[in-house]
């Protein structure tokens, strides 16, 4: 699917606003004849919405229980003696909805510990949770195929709020990975649009000192990298400069510091499935444009424009020279102004980063990896007694948290005393100004990140980029926490939305993928590294393509296209 154009994005926003108004107008309770205050039920009443086949309650009396399991981020902090099992969010769910969140187990998620624990629970026939959110794509597919979790499509159609449905409809393809025989087996966890689409971050202070402009083509980029290295404005020796900080330790297609846009200049994006000229899916790494891109990276490596050890660098490693002040360019998301690039000034006080568009290749082509609007999937146990309770919980978050408006229950933050507090004058304070320090309480919620509407953050950023003062919580949040250049960077991303190329195969691994893809990936990484490092000439790419096809790649392509044809 092509990325939304800005016109399409604005149209989708208009649709959501209409749906929200309609939902508000229809939100009156049958018992009271009026609307309960936001976030509350009227005293002495239990508000219910009649639905075909069941009741969706705003609060359960007697309470119901939802069991779950947790993979805890090692960096996640708690306060007041709380734990993931018992904290401000679990108390809130109990008080607000009559829903008790019960933990079957939790594990600190280092080195894949959560996935390991889930697989062990599944293989040893231990009790499965009522609700679990999975970020690991392969684990999600394995759990769906286990038969332990139910079809969710009818539940979503029946119980999800209009606002949640409208958010999901921004890209109906988000359901694709979790469909089996036409049945939706998991609810996609929505994420912000374009969250990992990238652009080029360039040292503006270096550009200014050299009297040069940001590059619009690869040729202009090469001239700039040469100047950064050999005429460095900060007086750094050539061997101390990383003109373009990229790495491809595991893949050519990641979230920061990757070179996939270089291949986009020749018409393809590696490590994903793109739409070929014949309308069928094509594995990007075997497209002829890859050969030209590999030759280009080989030239840049020989001239010292990219790190000598780029094949050993992952995404996080590429940020190190940028923060240290020795890199001139790094590709990455629009939010990098806040992290990690804001830290560059700690090492080089005068350093200034600015966002710029992806440059075009010799034929005017440009392309970048596109971001899907998801961040995992929520599965529901087929034996769950009250599956509608999940929608009671999540509908409220989509109505009040996904795009919080002034005066709403989450206007200032999630939980007072945790992610925000009020000072003596009643004004909100955040971060270190919160007594005892702030914590990322959104990670205590049952579903990762609570609730997100894909285009809500971009809408907030566009308002700021157009010079509007921040009014909503999202606008204030991005202004205060995401770095000063984030709105401008988001605008650059949207202005190039037509070059955003998403991975079009999002289904479960095919049979041949399961047995052959690991080998093919190793073959690909080895061949590409050998070409970039000059151990083999570019013609080795042609042999790689032949071997890839004959070693299972051709069958994988057929299977991927069979899935794609059935999907359409």
Image: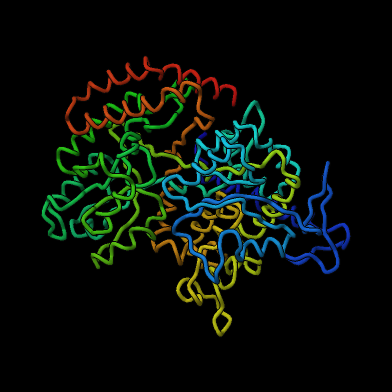
**Is 126 situated left or right of 276 in this image?**
right
Q: Is residue 165 above or below residue 440?
A: above
Residue 306: horizontal and vertical position, in percent? 21, 43
Q: On the picture, is 407 further left or further right than 502? A: right
Eyeballing the image, is 129 above or below 468?
A: above
Q: Position of residue 446 (x, y in %)?
A: 61, 54
Q: Nearer the viewer, residue 105 or 390?
A: 105
Q: Residue at x 35, y 58 (%)?
A: 340
Q: Return the residue nearer the eye: 457 or 503.
A: 503
Nearest to the observer: residue 294 or residue 218 = 294
x, y percentage for residue 229? Answer: 15, 50
Q: Is residue 296 visible?
A: yes
Identity of the residue drawn at 65% across and 60% down: 400
Residue 23 drawn above or below residue 425: above
Q: Is residue 274 rendered to the left or right of residue 540?
A: right
Front residue of this view, candidates 220 and 274: 274
Residue 269 % position (x, y): 38, 33
| Picture quadrant of residue 343 | bottom left
User: Looking at the figure, which quarter contains the C terminus?
Assistant: top right
Q: Is residue 13 left or right of residue 44?
A: left
Examine the rendering and report whether any part of residue 568 can be seen: no
- The residue shown at (31%, 28%) is 290
Farthest residue to the top: give it. Answer: 550
Residue ranking furthest to the bottom = 424
């Amino acid at each position: 699917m092509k990325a939304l154009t800005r016109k399409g994005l604005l149209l989708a926003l208009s649709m959501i606003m209409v749906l929200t108004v309609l939902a508000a107008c229809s939100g009156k309770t049958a018992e009271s004849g009026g609307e309960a205050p936001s976030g509350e039920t009227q005293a002495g009443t239990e508000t219910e919405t009649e639905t075909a086949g069941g009741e969706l309650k705003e609060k359960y009396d007697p309470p119901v229980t939802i069991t779950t399991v947790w993979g805890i981020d090692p960096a996640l902090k708690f306060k007041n003696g709380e734990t993931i099992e018992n904290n401000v969010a679990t108390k809130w769910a109990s008080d607000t909805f009559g829903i008790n969140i019960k933990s079957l187990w939790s594990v600190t998620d280092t080195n894949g510990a959560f996935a390991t624990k889930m697989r062990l629970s599944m293989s040893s026939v231990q009790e499965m949770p009522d609700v679990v959110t999975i970020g690991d794509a392969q684990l999600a597919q394995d759990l769906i195929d286990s038969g332990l979790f139910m079809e969710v499509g009818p539940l979503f159609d029946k119980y999800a709020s209009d606002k949640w449905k409208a958010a999901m409809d921004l890209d109906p393809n988000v359901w694709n990975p979790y469909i089996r025989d036409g049945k939706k087996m998991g609810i996609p966890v929505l994420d912000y649009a374009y969250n990992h689409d990238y652009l080029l971050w360039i040292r503006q202070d270096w550009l200014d000192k050299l009297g040069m402009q940001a590059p619009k083509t690869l040729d202009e980029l090469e001239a700039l990298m040469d100047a950064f290295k050999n005429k460095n404005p900060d007086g750094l020796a050539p061997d101390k400069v990383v003109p373009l900080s990229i790495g491809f330790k595991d893949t050519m297609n990641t979230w920061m510091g990757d070179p996939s846009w270089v291949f986009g200049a020749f018409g393809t994006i590696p490590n994903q499935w793109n739409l070929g000229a014949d309308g069928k899916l094509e594995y990007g790494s075997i497209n002829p444009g890859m050969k030209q891109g590999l030759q280009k990276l080989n030239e840049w490596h020989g001239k010292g424009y990219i790190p000598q050890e780029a094949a050993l660098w992952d995404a996080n490693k590429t940020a190190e020279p940028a923060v240290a002040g020795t890199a001139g360019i790094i590709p990455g998301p629009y939010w990098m102004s806040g992290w990690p690039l804001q830290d560059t000034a700690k090492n080089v006080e005068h350093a200034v980063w600015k966002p710029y568009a992806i440059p075009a290749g010799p034929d005017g082509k440009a392309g970048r990896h596109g971001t899907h609007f998801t961040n995992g999937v929520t599965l529901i146990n087929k034996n769950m007694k009250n599956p509608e309770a999940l929608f009671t919980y999540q509908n409220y978050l989509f109505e009040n948290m996904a795009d919080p408006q002034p005066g709403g229950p989450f206007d200032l933050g999630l939980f007072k005393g945790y992610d925000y507090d009020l000072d003596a004058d009643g004004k909100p304070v955040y971060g270190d100004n919160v007594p005892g320090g702030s914590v990322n309480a959104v990670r205590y919620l049952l579903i990762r990140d609570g609730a997100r509407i894909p285009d809500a953050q971009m809408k907030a950023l566009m308002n700021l980029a157009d010079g509007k003062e921040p009014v909503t919580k999202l606008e204030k949040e991005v202004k205060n926490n995401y770095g000063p250049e984030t709105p401008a960077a988001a605008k650059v991303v949207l202005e190039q939305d037509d070059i955003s190329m998403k991975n079009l195969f999002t289904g479960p691994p095919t049979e041949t993928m399961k047995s052959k893809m690991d080998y093919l990936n190793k073959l690909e990484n080895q061949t590409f590294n050998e070409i970039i490092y000059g151990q083999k000439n570019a013609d080795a790419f042609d042999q790689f393509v032949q071997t890839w096809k004959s070693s299972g790649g051709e069958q994988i392509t057929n299977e991927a296209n069979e899935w794609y044809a059935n999907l359409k």
